[in-house]
Image (cartoon, helix red, strand yellow):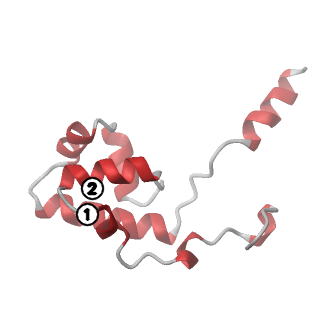
Amino acid sequence: MTLAHVSKIRDAYQVSRVPSPAAARIGELIASERVRRGLTQDDLAHLTRIDSSNIRGYEKGRALMGIPTLVRIAEALKIDPGMLLDGVTVDMFAVPAEDGRRRA
């Protein structure tokens, strides 16, 4: 197996960091609740044991966290996890048609 082959395999499994409307909305809700509670991003990072650079990425909508991370953030903010999904619709997770994935 060549280095080029390994690189192609690795690239196929990387998650895109392209912002989505869902990531942006969830990030807005996290930031709003964090500020309302008087917490800094570093405070939230400490409470959740999530790196502060990831907290910044989530709040800016550059990355979408998994469900366990969303629950950890909600618990640190003392809110129901569903509150961080307010206004989020399935269309906000749309995948470009050219990516080759099957659609429901």
Q: Disc 1 marks which residue?
A: 80
Residue at 74% in and 39% down: 11
Towards the viewer: 25 or 80: 80
How far apart are the two marked residues, 1 and 2, measured between alpha carbons? 6 Å
Q: Of helix, strand and loop, which one carries label 1?
A: loop
Residue 39 point in image, percent of width and height: 13, 51
Element class at badge 2: helix
Query: Which residue: 38% across, 44% down?
Result: 54
The image quadrant where one finds the C terminus is bottom right
Query: Of the residues shown, which amino acid type is indicated by label 2?
Result: Ala
Residue visible at 20% across and 40% down?
47
Kind of residue indicated by mark 1: Asp
Q: Please tell me whether residue 36 is drawn above or below residue 6 in the rendered image.
A: below
Q: Residue furthest left?
A: 38
Compared to residue 25, the image places residue 17 above or below, namely above
Q: Residue furthest right?
A: 1
Badge 1: how crowded within 10 Å, few (<14), some, or many (20+)? few
Out of 80 and 63, give the one closest to the viewer: 80
Identify the residue shown where x is 82% and y is 36%.
8
| Image coordinates for residue 2, horizontal then vertical, percent | 89, 21
Which residue is label 2 attached to?
Answer: 74
Disc 2 crowd rating (10 Å Cα; few below 14, some 14-19, many 20+) is many
Would residue 66 appear left or right of 15 to someone viewing this image? left
Task: Give the image location of residue 17, x and y in percent.
Answer: 56, 52
Horizontal side of 24 relative to 5 (left or right) equals left
First in sequence: mark 1 or mark 2? 2
35 with respect to 18 (left or right): left
Determine which quarter of the picture holds residue 29: bottom left
Residue 93 percent across, percent down from the top left: 57, 69
Q: Are marks 1 and 2 in contact (CB under 8 Å)?
A: yes
